[in-house]
Image (spheres, grey):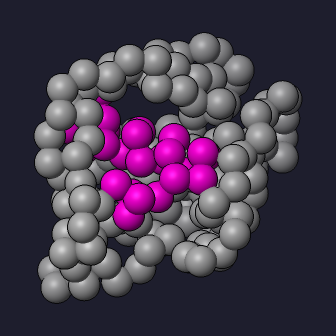
Amino acid sequence: MAILNVRTVPEPILRQKSKRVRAIDGSLQKLAADMIETMHAASGVGLAAPQVGVSRRVIVIGMPGEEDFALINPEVVRKSGERTVTEGCLSVPGYFGEIKRAQRVTVKGKDLSGKEIRIKADELLAQALEHEIDHLNGVLYIDYLESQDMLHKVAHEVTPL
Ligand code: NI
């Protein structure tokens, strides 16, 4: 495994729509393993492939106390409710902001063995799934700020996504 270089704004790859994965092969499994290692090295709880320079639809999630997992071609199929969250991103270092996210999301995708999975999530996991899937569409959380007053320099520890 290897720790990959995390891309930061304004690198153009962060604004591109990532391509769907057609084959889950050894190179994709290595990418996911490297992304998980990179996420932990950066103390993040989620990471999307474009953040490590790969424009493919792959995300990894590592919730505290839970098993890490990768999702291939993930999609939000349902969301409900709204809440205000404090959010940061490894690709926007040194800042955090307050934005609105769904309260609950249902996400579908494939795991690394190619099996279809469906996840119903709330709290931090819902936030992380929305955040990472946004990355695959070239969207960053800062796009949701209602005003620049809602973006702050990091004065305390915020878990980056
Ligand atoms: Ni992010």
113 relative to 116 in the view: left or right:
right
Q: Position of residue 110 (x, y in %)?
A: 62, 23
Q: Is residue 134 magenta?
A: yes
Q: Quadrant of residue 8?
A: bottom right
| Residue at left offset 18%, top offset 26% | 81
Query: Magenta residues?
Result: 121-144
Residue at the front extreme, as displayed: 147
52 relative to 159 in the view: left or right:
right
| Residue at left offset 60%, top offset 14% | 116
Q: Examine the rendered structure and indicate whether residue 4 appears above or below residue 46.
A: below
92 relative to 9 in the view: left or right:
left
Which residue is at the front of the view, 73 or 82? 82
Q: Quadrant of residue 7?
A: bottom right
Q: Position of residue 1 (x, y in %)?
A: 69, 62
Q: Examine the rendered structure and indicate whether residue 48 appears above or below residue 110.
A: below
Which residue is at the front of the view, 127 or 39? 127
Magenta span: predominant SS is helix
Residue 60 visible in image:
no
Residue 67 visible in image:
yes
